[in-house]
Amino acid sequence: MPVLHQMQLSGNCYKVRLTAKQLGVPITLKEYPELGSETRKPAFLAKNPNGRVPLLEFEDGRLLPESGAIIFHLSEGTKLQPTDKWARAQMLSWMFFEQYSHEPYIAVARFWLAFAPKDELEKKRHLVPEWHDKGNAALGVMETHLSKHEWFAGENYSIADIALYGYTHCAGEGGFTLSDYPAVSAWLKRVANQPGHILLDARW
Ligand SMILES: N[C@@H](CCC(=O)N[C@@H](CS)C(=O)NCC(=O)O)C(=O)O
């Protein structure tokens, strides 16, 4: 069975657990502490030189890092990816948006404000306004799209929704006010109502 190297509280790892659960793909979890830099030690770097989770390790030894690539691979040919060529391009477009314009601000604000040691946070405090400005800009882009569409790619729930749900649903922990975004808030409920949905902190 593939092993997901992961941290339970990471939204990036949650995307993989949610995708696997909704597709019925069996995986086992290997947990790493959120703090302590375990993923920067030689044993882990030998598996992922980028020193980050999620990392999916297959039984034959193949290793796949990056949440977007992992959920894309797991869901290939399933209901979680559109078949229409344009909708598939839209799916990837939103997944790249999540990685460049959303996660670096919303996930980072959440980590430092909700989980990092307070003395470490103080060293980063000057960056918080920028994280909030850019994170709110990303939420605004999502709000505009969701005011006119039910889902991010095509007519159905897909891995683009999972990728964006990972850190949007818990953005409040990073100091964002989700009630300012009614279309995003309604979409969060639609995602949470999908069959097989699991919570970020659900035990495996
Ligand atoms: N782009 C990567 C980001 C992965 C990432 O930032 N992982 C964090 C946890 S959310 C991590 O491994 N942090 C530990 C470290 O950087 O040492 C993805 O989407 O998988």
Image (cartoon, rainbow, N blue to C red):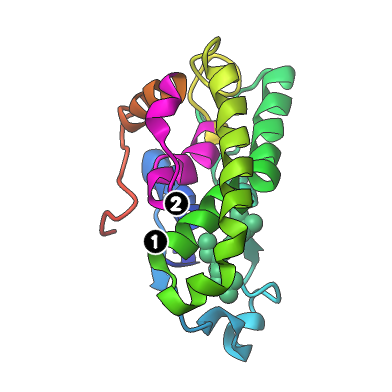
Q: Residue at x 63, y 90 (%)?
A: 42
Q: Does the residue tagged 1 have its C-beta within 8 Å of any atom of ligand 1?
A: no
The majority secondary structure of the magenta stretch comes to helix
Q: Residue at x 44, y 51 (%)?
A: 174
Q: Does the residue tagged 2 have its C-beta within 8 Å of any atom of ligand 1?
A: no
For the residues labelled 2 and 1, the Cα–Cα distance comes to 7 Å
Residue 174 placement, left or right of 77: left
Instruction: Point out the quarter of the image occupied by ligand 1.
Output: bottom right
Q: Which residue occupies the extreme top position in the image?
A: 148
The amino acid type found where label 2 is placed reads: Gly
Which one is in front, 93 or 43?
Answer: 93
Q: For residue 171, what is the image quadrant?
A: top left
Tell me: residue 181, above or below residue 22. above
Q: Is residue 66 magenta?
A: no
The amino acid type found where label 1 is placed reads: Ala
Q: Where is residue 21 in the image (x, y as percent from the top left)?
A: 37, 46
Q: Does the magenta stretch include residue 178?
A: yes
Which numbered circle lies on residue 174? 2
Residue 49 placement, left or right of 32: right
Q: Mark 1 points at which residue?
A: 114
Q: Residue at x 70, y 40 (%)?
A: 96
Specify the segment rendered in magenta: 161-182
Local SS, label 2: helix
10 Å neighbourhood of mark 1: few (<14), some, or many (≥20)? some
Q: Where is residue 179 in the image (x, y as percent from the top left)?
A: 37, 28
Question: Residues at badges 2 and 1 in contact (C-beta under 8 Å)?
Answer: yes
Q: Which residue occupies the extreme left position in the image?
A: 203
Quarter of the picture containing the N terminus is: bottom left
